[in-house]
Image (cartoon, helix red, strand yellow):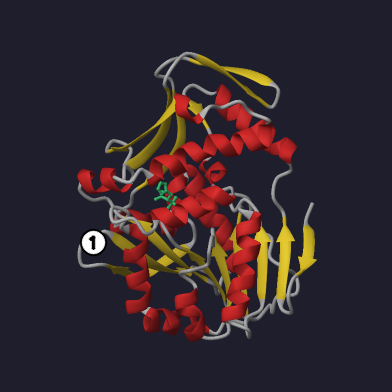
């Protein structure tokens, strides 16, 4: 059920996020699996969103700065493809830092940031409005794994351009990624497009360093998920009884983030007793890594034509321009 609210002039808020009960079912289901699993979306409470912003500034974490350099370098090419006055839909907008690089050029009729972290999303929308007073913003809190519901009052004839930066598609299993891309194809329509940023397969030591930074920020980000679960489920997770473990799995072409139980212990959550063995793992994130050829082929199956790819000199990161195939 959507809760809507009006912010400052020209800023609209929508909340489609899961009710606590649904989160309870989802979280306990994951923790009953072997190995135990928790969706990466539970990283992003207020603290988690702030820790992720800190990760993007780490020397080892190259994706964000590499993508930002590509957006600046190819802004005019992107404008040529998007055209002016489109309707821009951004998935996982977070602090909306990257889109700021494109707004003056693209002059969209409306901008729809989608994110699961409600307070962070709404605060970012108000800040963005101060920087771009002419921009109509529809900040929509939802789990973008579901089909995005766009506001009814959007101009129908405007070109719909989806923006999915940061290689967040990497959190989906290949099956779910295909489902997600088909949802986006449905949302942008036959004349629409998708600009997506993806992290590319590269030497394992570079990947492993990006998820095991020397300052321990990624470890804090990973462990903070347990604090978030405690706040959602009156939990008794003790952070110092778990440790961060992240590594590149070449067979699956993905980074895996785990939390490891340092001892035999029982944790209460949502009124349930959850036993953990010493050395037992909780999988908190898969971050798949891509190749240009592999993803261009993959996008075709979702109804998109990859008409342009921009990469950095080291081939570490790529921006793909995907036109909807009508
Ligand atoms: C936001 C999913 C793209 O996988 O690189 C950063 C999240 N996890 N450090 C990623 C993350 C650990 C990030 N994504």
Mark 1 nearby-residue class (10 Å; few <14, some 14–19, many ≥20)? some
Q: Position of residue 178 (x, y in %)?
A: 49, 50
Give how far across and how far down residue 144 sits, in percent. Answer: 59, 53
Q: Nearer the viewer, residue 68 or 33?
A: 68
In the rendering, at what x and y percent does residue 126 appear?
Answer: 64, 71
Q: Residue at 67% x, 62% y: name it.
A: 140
Q: Nearer the viewer, residue 299 or 119?
A: 119
State how many labels appear.
1
- The residue pinned by badge 1 equals 315
- 257 vs 194, left or right, is left
Give the image location of residue 313, x and y in percent. 20, 67
Regarding residue 253, the answer to whether it shows in the image is: yes
Q: Is residue 301 visible?
A: no
| CB at disc 1 and ligand 1 closer than 8 Å | no
Residue 15, image quadrant: bottom right
From the viewer's perspective, tell me whether residue 117 is left or right of residue 295. right
Secondary structure category for the residue under label 1: loop
In the image, is 90 to the left or to the right of 139?
left
For the point 79% across and 51% down, the residue is: 1
Q: Is residue 105 above or below residue 165?
A: below
Above-or-below relation of 283 to 279: below
The picture quadrant where one finds residue 184 is bottom right
Q: In this image, 50 relative to 230: left or right?
A: left
Give the residue at x 33% y 52%: 290
């Amino acid at each position: 059920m959507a809760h809507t609210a009006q912010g400052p002039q020209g800023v609209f808020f929508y909340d489609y996020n899961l009710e606590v009960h649904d989160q309870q079912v989802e979280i306990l289901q994951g923790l009953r699996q072997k190995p135990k699993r928790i969706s990466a979306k539970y990283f992003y409470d207020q603290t988690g969103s702030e820790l992720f912003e800190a990760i993007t500034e780490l020397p080892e974490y190259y994706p964000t700065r590499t993508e930002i350099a590509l957006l600046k370098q190819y802004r005019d090419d992107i404008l040529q493809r998007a055209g002016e006055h489109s309707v821009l839909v951004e998935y996982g907008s977070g602090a909306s830092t990257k889109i700021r690089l494109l707004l003056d050029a693209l002059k969209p009729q409306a901008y729809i940031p989608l994110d699961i972290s409600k307070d962070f999303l709404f605060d970012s929308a108000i800040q963005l409005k101060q920087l771009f007073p002419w921009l109509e913003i529809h900040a929509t809190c939802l789990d973008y794994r579901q089909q995005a519901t766009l506001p009814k009052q959007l101009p129908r004839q405007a070109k719909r351009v989806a923006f999915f930066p940061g290689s967040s598609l990497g959190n989906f299993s290949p099956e779910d990624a295909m489902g997600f891309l088909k949802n986006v194809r449905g949302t942008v329509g036959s004349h629409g497009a998708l600009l997506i940023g993806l992290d590319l397969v590269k030497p394992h030591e570079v990947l492993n360093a990006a998820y095991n930074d020397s300052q321990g920020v990624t470890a804090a980000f990973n462990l903070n998920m347990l604090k978030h679960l405690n706040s959602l489920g009156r939990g008794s997770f003790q952070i110092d009884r778990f440790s961060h473990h992240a590594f590149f799995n070449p067979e699956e072409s993905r980074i895996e983030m785990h939390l490891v139980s340092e001892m035999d212990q029982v944790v209460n959550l949502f009124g349930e007793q959850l036993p953990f063995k010493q050395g037992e793992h909780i999988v908190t994130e898969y971050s798949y890594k891509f190749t240009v050829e592999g993803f261009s082929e993959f996008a075709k199956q979702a109804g998109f034509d990859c008409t342009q790819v921009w990469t950095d000199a080291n081939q570490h990161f790529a921006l793909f321009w995907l036109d909807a195939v009508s």
